[in-house]
Amino acid sequence: MAEHIDHLLTGEGRTFPPSEAFRADAVVDERIYDEARADRLGFWADRARELHWHRDFTEVLDWQPPHARWFGDGQLNVAYNCLDRHVEAGNGDRVALHWEGEPGDRRTITYAELTDEVRRLANVLESHGVGAGDRVAIYLPMLPEAVAAMLACARIGAIHSVVFGGFSASNLRMRIDDARATFVITADGTWRKGKVLPLKPVVDEALAADGHDVSGVLVVRRGENEIEWVEGRDRWYHEAMADASAEHEAPALDAEHPLFILYTSGSTGKPKGILHTSGGYLTQAAFTHRAVFDLHPETDVYWCTADVGWITGHSYVVYGPLANGATQVLYEGTMDTPGPGRPWELIERYGVTIFYTAPTAIRTFMKLGRQHVQSSDLSSLRVLGTVGEPINPEAWLWYREVVGSGIAPIVDTWWQTETGAMMIAPLPGVTALKPGSAQVPLPGIAIDVVDDAGTVVADGEGGLLVVTEPWPSMLRTIWGDDDRYRETYWERFGDRYFAGDGARRDADGDIWLLGRVDDVMNVSGHRLSTAEIESSLVGHESTAEAAVVGASDETTGQAVVAFVILKSRFADAQSLEESERTLRAHVASDIGPIARPRQVFIVPDLPKTRSGKIMRRLLRDLAEGRDLGDTTTLADQGVVEAIRSQLR
Ligand code: WT7
């Protein structure tokens, strides 16, 4: 019994092999590992050739560490692969998107219709002078137009930079400036938690000050909220589309043509513009989507809950599923609007068979109670996925039991904005699943766990996760900052990629992810930088000094906890509650609501080492209410007591 409970808590030791029925019908079997092992580059070349190439490649990989070229002399068009190809194969009538708005309005869009939409939009963009290599900022919510906008850019070779709709005007502006974007696509507003959240006003605010290159703003009508209009710059999406031709030939673009930039937090205050290119990215996004979810495009209905503003939305809402001709659900709103049964109603209505979400969402569903789940018929579900952070075995088992009727395989997928596509994950028809572990590198992917010196550690020992061979969907650089690209990922271990995650391999060779080892927090599966929030806090007039840590949180994985020293005139003039409230609101409006600290502690001092470095470990211990370990390097032992007295 004790052993049984132990297994339940750790997940270790208890495995769930695929059922015979699942295995018999799976799209890949165990031979795929042998195939990739026998000839890694040949394996990826075969996966690439499952796409349509305008010009076939002869070169698979050119690796000049840390720069890779995949399929370098080939040419393809990413949008053609996601759209026209399926129509030409006779699948134009297949549903691409079952879209549902938060208020419950619905649209069904076939592959033929989406192809038509993207061709028109490609013409609209070109008529505004947007061409190959130009950067387009997309600030759109979860609408079919967001998918169309990304694909229209891909079609003409413009580089999109999608900015999550929860980011503030200053964050949007920073991304517009860094990429020197010339065009913006947005919406008037979107439905969120039963209200219209305005978006166009954020774009107006972002563009208010001169110094940017944006000459046009295309506006999708959705919220029907009142907006201001800049004549000569702004244009309604539906008006532009009505005038546009549906004829547009997809040009052949180089395999290494840039596809998109996506900003993500690093350990410094400035977000990194992760650059992905075309052929290799699409190859790995499509292959992993098909193999890891066991996709049968003729019969499956797939739903990934991620927003297109994150990498998961890029690779597993747009590029992977559409390259595979999948039918999917796209949902505009929040999971608890109008009530906690919302996701399960959607699964029943559309007969969703594959569901992909984040551990934080699963823990929230768990807390709300199984009755909300069980009031819908979920018998269509046959594969469940998770991504974004380690999933605790309790949540894994609940997910399988309550959502997956005790039979659906769960694929825990480890990857990053930088990796572009999944890297470590089980294959549901092959792997005996182990709750809490992402398990094994995918075929064609090479991973090690090493110590600080770069030596592979023994199984069972913790270390740092590295990718030892280049992979097709790897980032190619950081936009405009190749030095930072080298320093961040490649300086530490030579030509091995440093992921920034701690990991451990167990005796079976399965990999357990142990969280970030840098100053990056993971809040609800979203990456936030401690430095970025600290600089936002210091940007407020009342702050003298700030330190931010990620403290463990039952629901969100980690939560932002800030320690702030006020300037004395504010410390005297305001109540602690007032200061805390002001600073939390300041961060939310400065960066975005996702960065809002769970707690702000106003403290008289911060614990520092004798060399002046803030001791974050100690602050994290304090925030999590733990006993403090070794504090002998602390310069002033009295500081801790002073802070502790503030933590109520
Ligand atoms: C970081 C990447 C990949 C899309 C979502 C997040 C953590 C991601 C897992 C997982 C344990 C995970 C890592 C990684 N992470 N998936 N299955 N198990 N940790 O993308 O914002 O680039 O964040 O998320 O710490 O480094 P991202």
Image: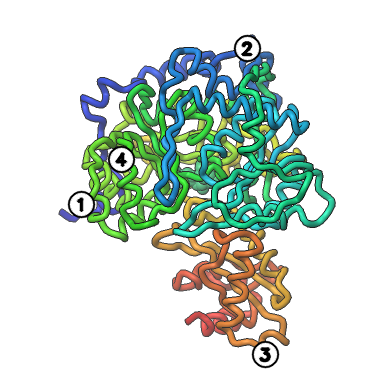
Q: Earlier in the sequence, mark 2 or mark 3?
A: 2
- Rendered image: mark on residue 3: 1
| Amino acid at circle 3 | Asp
Q: Earlier in the sequence, mark 4 or mark 2?
A: 2
Mark 1 vs 2: CB contact within 8 A: no
Instruction: Give the Cα separation between the discs numbered 1 and 2.
Output: 58 Å
Q: Is residue 157 left or right of residue 192?
A: right
Residue ID at (69%, 75%): 543
Instruction: Give the Cα separation between the discs numbered 1 and 3.
Output: 56 Å
Mark 4 vs 2: CB contact within 8 A: no
- Rendered image: mark on residue 54: 2
Residue ID at (37%, 57%): 338
Residue ID at (56%, 24%): 116
In-front residue for pair 41/52: 52
Q: Which residue is mark 4?
A: 349
Q: Which residue is mark 3?
A: 572
